[in-house]
Image (cartoon, rainbow, N blue to C red):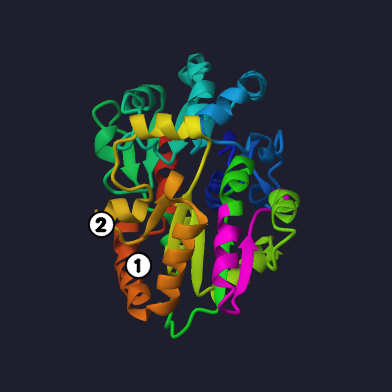
């Protein structure tokens, strides 16, 4: 069955999901013509991206506003490409604000094109009005978390929980006697790295005055130059590339990580961690006003308790980070307690243990039959 499929993923996390989804789509629809926007992982599957997704590497309200003209231009270019391609199916992945602005402008195509969005927007945290927007403007919504579909179903009955693919693999719980290897994850966007990495480096320097720890910075290939510049006066190693990062994760005893998708990746590998986040001051003020959640990361939200310590905004400083890091280093029970929650997290993150991307393609296939 011949199909034209347009996929839109503008972030590294979207590229990860797009890669897994694209593999399943190619098996289900081997003759499909596929194009769109994606990252390096998707490109390994002979997917040619219209633009490098590193161009879209920014988040935060103020940070996005500073580049608003760039995003408007790209949205118009993508819309032109979609109309030119004339797809049977459009799949947008994560990046809800950007994706919705594209989808909103091409609703006239719904007479013959199906619209699918993977990773429902976090309307339970803020911008609840987006539940109605997405429900009415898409034919199918696919959720990674079990509690999310209820927010969308009153606007769109085709909203399904598929689970998170990070947890669809076998991992053994770690036995941590000592902490020797610390990995720093300063974020996947330039503005995150600029705000967060200096605080991480300052804190680890304080800790290493009394210890001899092996400290690595884990980053994306396109961010290596920025990371090198920020860390040039510190005794740390910079790692990038999927195989290298995978090896580093297997050796990591403790992670200090910017809040984001990497938290779930670390939890799935049973790596104890501290979550940090810092951004533009004006963005912080707006976020504090709009977001009414006690926790910032999804693990704490799912358990409704502080499983992973969070140091956000003004608390993301060298004193607080070094204090918590020392506690993790010195207290094995503190680390073990966190890992015990990670061992039960998998059940919450999968739909009866099934492969999330197999479920996703099944729902997409059912949609295309109608």
Of 235 and 6, the residue lying toward us: 235
Q: Can residue 230 be seen in this view?
A: yes
Residue at x 30% of width, y 50% of height: 301
What residue occupies the far bottom of the structure in this picture?
177
Is 154 on the left or on the right of 53, as rendered? left
Classify 176 as above or below 54.
below
Q: x, y percentage for residue 204?
A: 57, 65
Q: Quadrant of residue 271?
A: bottom left
Q: Considering the numbered disc 1 on the image, is that residue within a helix, a strand or a loop?
A: helix
Picture residue at 44% right of the left edge, 58% below the top:
320
Reply yes or no: does residue 200 show up in magenta. Answer: yes
Residue 157 location, quadrant: top left
Whether residue 260 appears in this view of the structure is no
Residue furthest top in the image: 108
Q: Mark 1 points at which residue?
A: 342
The mark found on residue 305 in the picture is 2
Q: Say whether residue 235 is left or right of residue 260.
A: right
Question: What is the distance, in whole Å, between disc 2 and disc 1 at their CAs?
Answer: 13 Å
- Residue 12 position within the rendered picture, expressed as x and y whole percent measured from the top left: 59, 47
Query: Which disc number belongs to residue 113?
Result: none
**Vertical placement of 343 versus 194: above or below?**
below
Q: Which of 140 and 306 lies nearest the eye of the viewer?
A: 306
Q: Which of marks 2 and 1 is in front?
A: 2
- C-beta proximity under 8 Å, tags 2 and 1: no
Residue 258: x, y in percent? 50, 52
Range shown magenta: 199-222
Percent position (x, y) of residue 144?
38, 48
* In this rendering, position of residue 74 left or right of residue 336: right
Q: Which of 262 and 1 is in front in this view?
A: 262
Q: What residue is shown at x 50% (from left), y 75% (from top)?
A: 253
Please tell me whether residue 342 belongs to the stretch shown in magenta.
Answer: no
Q: How many numbered callouts?
A: 2
């Amino acid at each position: 069955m011949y199909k034209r499929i347009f996929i839109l993923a503008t972030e590294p996390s979207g590229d990860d999901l797009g890669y897994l989804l694209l593999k399943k789509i190619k098996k289900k629809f081997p003759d499909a013509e596929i194009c769109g926007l994606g990252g390096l992982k998707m490109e390994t599957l002979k997917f040619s991206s219209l633009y490098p997704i590193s161009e879209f590497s920014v988040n935060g309200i103020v940070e996005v506003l500073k580049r608003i003209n760039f995003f408007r231009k790209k949205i118009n270019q993508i819309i032109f490409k979609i109309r030119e391609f004339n797809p049977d199916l459009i799949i947008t992945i994560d990046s809800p604000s950007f994706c919705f602005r594209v989808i909103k402008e091409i609703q006239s195509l719904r007479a013959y094109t199906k619209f699918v969005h993977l990773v429902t927007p976090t309307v339970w945290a803020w911008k609840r009005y987006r539940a109605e927007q997405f429900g009415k403007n898409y034919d199918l919504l696919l959720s990674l978390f079990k509690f999310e579909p209820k927010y969308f179903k009153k606007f769109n009955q085709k909203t399904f929980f598929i689970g998170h693919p990070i947890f669809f693999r076998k991992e053994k719980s770690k036995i941590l006697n000592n902490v020797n290897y610390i990995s720093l994850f300063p974020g996947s966007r330039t503005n995150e790295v600029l705000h967060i990495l200096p605080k991480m480096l300052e804190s680890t320097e304080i800790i290493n005055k009394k210890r001899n720890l092996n400290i690595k910075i884990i980053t994306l290939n396109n961010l290596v130059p920025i990371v090198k510049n920020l860390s040039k006066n510190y005794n740390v190693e910079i790692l990038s590339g999927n195989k290298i990062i995978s090896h580093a994760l297997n050796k990591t005893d403790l992670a200090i990580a910017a809040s984001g998708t990497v938290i779930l990746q670390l939890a799935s590998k049973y790596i104890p961690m501290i979550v940090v986040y810092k951004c533009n001051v004006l963005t912080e003020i707006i976020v504090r006003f709009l977001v009414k959640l006690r926790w910032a990361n999804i693990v704490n939200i799912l358990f409704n308790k502080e499983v992973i310590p969070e140091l956000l905004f003004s608390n993301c400083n060298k004193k607080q980070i070094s204090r918590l890091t020392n506690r993790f280093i010195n207290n094995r029970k503190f680390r073990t307690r966190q890992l015990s929650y990670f061992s039960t997290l998998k059940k919450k993150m999968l739909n009866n243990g099934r492969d999330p991307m197999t479920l996703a393609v099944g729902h997409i296939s059912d949609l295309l039959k109608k």
